[in-house]
């Protein structure tokens, strides 16, 4: 089935060719949704953009297009307005038929992408022995949503956790571990080394203050790199411990991701440097091996270097990403690699991509995209901190969201004199709290900083998870009240009479374009906005039209609209990583 918008687009494209000849093949008809129903549903603005090229007045062009447009099965007779806008209004019959078609489709009219792309989503990626911070939380939530969306479209997605599990910091960690907990390394059973973040702080302090510790730490790095057994054991122990902590967060957030940390690329780093040398790209700069970048200059106006091998022979974060590009495009055959990190790393990726490009390591047709996001701020507009001024632990942040959700729920239960089991309360508050955190993040344009506010994200009104979940619950309430089995309505007709029904129907038909846009541009907030407007349109419809009390055939038709809204919400929310609730 052709989507509503694609159908319209194709008709216009055919008309353009028929009116002005094959030169106009593939011209974008510049369709925009109108903001005033007076002008119909869509406006084609192509006549204005063609005026120069065709040396004709836009209005005359618009008239010719309309003369060649075969569209009566879709639209009312097109109207030309102003300088040459073509106003198009869908016929109700057509909308009813389209809606009926998506109603009986499990994918709700969203086609699978052809061809499917082998895609890597590199997200979350915290660092071993360090706290997973709110930046990683953003990456985790956005990455999961992007991966789910691409998978739903049928792409072959590999989700990778590029954990920071390698580097010189392991020297001090291993040395500290050897001192304070030698049995951890010698015993075969794993030993709990306690709070890793505290452990990291202690190691760092000793590294900064004790000369001897520093020297031993440097030696430990060499040990680790040369595969010394005790160093490796210590390293593994540290990684394992961190992994357990990260996994707790992933479990709570329902995140699926495969760990493939920086250490994985370690054996490939030498070759990166070697190959860059033979390509003539690597140069010596103050003892280090670097590639001088194009378009990046230092304060003296000289080309900035990207260090590939440090003067002590060690490799770094950038070298690892270069190796990863090769491994991912060659071994993994990735056609699109999506990196989700804070905007602060934009330069890092631009530089690494440039070097990979100049080395011809990016095969034709392969797209590497950095998906940057802004900072998470506290309500005071500053970096997110606890009341006592410490950095916020993700665990306590999620706990607080759940507690807030529970408080709201208890109030509602009391206000409505409901009786609910402790189990229900726990289940609903956990789902609402976690969903609220995810939704608050995803509903922002990711490139801007966002203010973290429990009150706002938990509110039952506004562009929030609870509002969306509530719209879904409302529909389930209708089915319970009327004892309706939605799955049995399929054969009836959908009739769109009231304006609110038409508005809801048109919005339901835009799901496919919305999801495809998210997959292309990687802005989850568009899907949130879509779902928010869907909930609003549903609520308007439900306020104006009676459903259970309506006469047939409206009753069944309206029940189908309710059901389709709920299924659309469920699907959309699932792509955001948010499960629906039957009651709340
Ligand atoms: N570990 C890094 C950090 O915490 C993020 C890694 C992102 N992925 C990558 N391929 N560089 O900032």
Image (tube, rainbow, N blue to C red):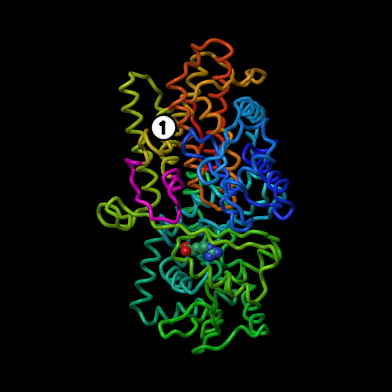
**433 or 456, nearer to the observer:** 456
In the rendered image, residue 233, in percent from the top left (x then y), is placed at 55, 66
Outermost residue, left direction?
A: 388
Visible in this render: residue 268? yes
Residue 89 x %, y %: 57, 33
Bounds of the magenta span? Answer: 438-456
Q: Quadrant where the N terminus lies?
A: top right
Position in image of residue 509 (x %, y %): 59, 34
The residue positioned 51% from the left and 89% from the top of the image is 287
Pick the residue in front: 401 or 21. Answer: 21
Say whether residue 444 is magenta.
yes
Instruction: Tell me the residue that label 1 is attached to.
Output: 426
Using residue 437 as the reference point, say whether residue 140 is left or right of it: right
Where is residue 154 shown, x and y percent of the image?
67, 45
Does residue 346 sit above or below 273 in this rendering? above
Tell me if the residue at label 1 has its CB under 8 Å from ligand 1: no
Residue 377 in magenta stretch = no
To which quarter of the image does residue 398 belong? top left
């Amino acid at each position: 089935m052709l989507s509503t918008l694609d159908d319209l687009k194709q008709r216009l494209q055919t008309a353009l060719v028929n009116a002005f000849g094959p030169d106009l093949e593939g011209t974008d008809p510049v369709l925009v949704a109108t903001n005033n129903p007076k002008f119909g549903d869509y406006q084609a603005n192509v006549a204005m953009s063609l005026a120069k090229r065709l040396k004709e007045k836009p209005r005359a062009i618009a008239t010719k297009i309309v003369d060649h447009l075969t569209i009566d099965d879709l639209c009312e007779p097109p109207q030309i307005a102003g300088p040459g806008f073509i106003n198009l209004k869908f016929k109700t019959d057509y909308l009813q038929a389209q809606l009926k078609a998506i109603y009986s489709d499990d994918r709700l009219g969203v086609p699978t992408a052809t061809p499917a792309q082998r895609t890597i989503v590199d997200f979350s990626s915290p660092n071993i022995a360090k706290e997973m911070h709110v930046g990683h939380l953003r990456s985790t939530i956005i990455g999961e949503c992007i991966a789910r969306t691409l998978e739903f479209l049928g792409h072959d997605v590999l989700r990778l956790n590029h954990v920071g599990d390698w580097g010189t910091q392991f020297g001090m960690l291993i040395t500290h571990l050897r001192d304070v907990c030698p049995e951890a390394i010698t015993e075969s059973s794993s030993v709990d080394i306690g709070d890793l973040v505290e452990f990291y702080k202690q190691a760092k302090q000793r590294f900064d203050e004790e000369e001897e510790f520093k020297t031993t730490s440097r030696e430990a790095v060499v040990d680790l790199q040369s595969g010394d057994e005790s160093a490796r054991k210590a390293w593994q122990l540290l990684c394992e411990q961190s992994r357990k902590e990260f996994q707790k967060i992933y479990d709570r957030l329902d995140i699926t991701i495969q760990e493939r940390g920086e250490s994985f690329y370690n054996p490939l780093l030498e070759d990166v440097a070697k190959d860059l040398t033979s390509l003539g790209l690597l140069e010596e700069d103050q003892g280090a091996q670097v590639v001088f970048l194009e378009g990046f200059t230092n304060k003296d106006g000289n080309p900035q270097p990207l260090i590939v091998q440090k003067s002590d022979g060690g490799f770094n974060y950038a070298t690892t990403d270069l190796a990863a590009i090769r491994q991912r495009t060659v071994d993994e055959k990735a056609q699109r690699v999506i990196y989700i990190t804070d905007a602060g790393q934009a330069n890092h990726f631009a530089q690494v991509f440039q070097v990979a490009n100049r080395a011809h390591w990016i095969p034709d047709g392969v797209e590497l995209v950095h998906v940057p996001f802004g900072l998470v701020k506290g309500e005071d507009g500053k970096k997110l901190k606890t009341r006592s001024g410490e950095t916020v632990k993700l665990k306590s942040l999620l706990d607080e969201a759940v507690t807030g959700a529970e408080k709201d729920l208890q109030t509602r239960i009391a206000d409505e004199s409901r009786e609910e089991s402790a189990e229900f309360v726990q289940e609903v508050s956990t789902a609402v709290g976690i969903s609220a955190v995810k939704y608050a993040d995803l509903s922002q344009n990711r490139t801007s900083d966002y203010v973290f506010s429990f009150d706002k994200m938990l509110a039952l009104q506004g562009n929030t998870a609870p509002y969306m979940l509530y719209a879904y619950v409302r529909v389930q309430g209708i089915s319970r009240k009327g004892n309706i089995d939605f799955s049995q309505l399929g054969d009836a007709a959908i009739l769109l009479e009231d304006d609110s029904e038409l508005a809801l129907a048109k919005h339901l038909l835009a799901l496919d374009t919305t999801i495809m846009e998210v997959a292309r541009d990687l802005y989850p907030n568009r899907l949130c906005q879509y779902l928010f407007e869907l909930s609003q349109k549903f609520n308007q419809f439900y306020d104006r039209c009676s459903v259970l009390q309506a006469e047939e055939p409206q009753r069944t038709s309206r029940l189908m609209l309710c059901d389709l809204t709920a299924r659309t919400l469920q699907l959309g929310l699932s792509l955001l990583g948010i499960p629906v609730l039957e009651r709340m």
